[in-house]
Image (cartoon, grey):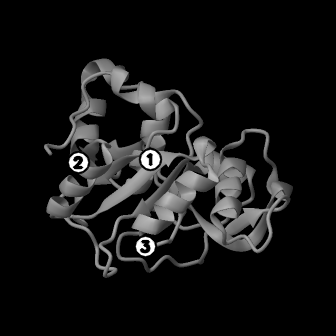
Amino acid sequence: MPRASIRSRRRYGPWRRGVRCWWWTNEDRENEGDIIFAAQFATPALMGWTVRYSSGVICVPLDGARADALALPPMVEINEDSKGTAYTVSCDASAGVSTGISATDRALTARVLADPGSRPGSLTRPGHVFPLRAVNGGVRERPGHTEAAVDLCRLAGVEPVGVIAELVYDNGEMMRLDGLRSFAAEHGCPLISIEDLVAYLGAPQRVGQVSGTAGNEERR
């Protein structure tokens, strides 16, 4: 199955309804694929499916303003991650969860993170979901999965908060491009490269379509 190209906003229609897709990063970066969907559409079934086929680590990319509004500071003072992944402190929803680890609980936490009405008290820290802070400027500033998720949400006209999880084989090893293609074909979901998203957003007529300007936030 060839990867999907980004041609028009019509591609985002199904995604607005919570349909998942896969991101693929080029071989000179991570050469990995993520399940990605808009956090506001997280359901127990979708979260359970995501956990089943991924590493099980659920991350929620969001922009810096949302992280600040929810009082989600960096996980560590000095970030030593090789990719500069901008983890904030982990969290759970403060109401309606049990231990926080079930698919139901993590789906609720994702929806709380996406809800513009949420406040710092809507979350407890630490928890079982890992928010990631996207840099200003999105994938044009940094071509990472964090920024791709936030940019795609904005393009789709939904809350700029995503859910991502890295796809793995049944043996736990990372799924690479050939496996991603087969998996996407099997499950009927688009496979989009971040390189294509960068090119799409870089077109002169689309500059400004995604909010945020290049800044100096710590890279993922």
Looking at the image, is mark 3 or mark 2 earlier in the sequence? Answer: 3
Q: Height in image: 134 above or below 103?
A: above
Q: Are marks 3 and 2 in contact (CB under 8 Å)?
A: no
Pair 1/3: label in front: 3
Q: Is residue 102 visible?
A: yes
At 49% from the left edge and 71% from the top edge, which residue is drawn? 56
x and y percent of residue 153 in the render? 49, 37
* Left or right of residue 9, residue 123 in this image: right
- Taking depth in this image into account, of 133 and 159 the one nearest to the observer is 159
Which residue, given by chain and number where applicable, does mark 2 sit on? 185
Which residue, given by chain and number where applicable, does mark 1 sit on? 149
Q: Pick the quarter of the image with the N terminus.
A: top left
Query: Quadrant location of residue 208?
Result: top left
- In the image, what residue type sits under mark 3? Ser
* Left or right of residue 171, residue 133 in this image: right
At 42% from the left edge and 77% from the top edge, which residue is drawn? 81
- Taking depth in this image into account, of 44 and 119 the one nearest to the observer is 44
CA neighbours of label 3 inside 10 A, class few (<14), some (14 to 19), many (20+): some
Pair 2/1: label in front: 2
At 34% from the left edge and 27% from the top edge, which residue is drawn? 11
Q: Is residue 155 visible?
A: no
x and y percent of residue 220 in the render? 43, 63
- In the image, what residue type sits under mark 1? Ala
Q: Height in image: 73 above or below 200?
A: below
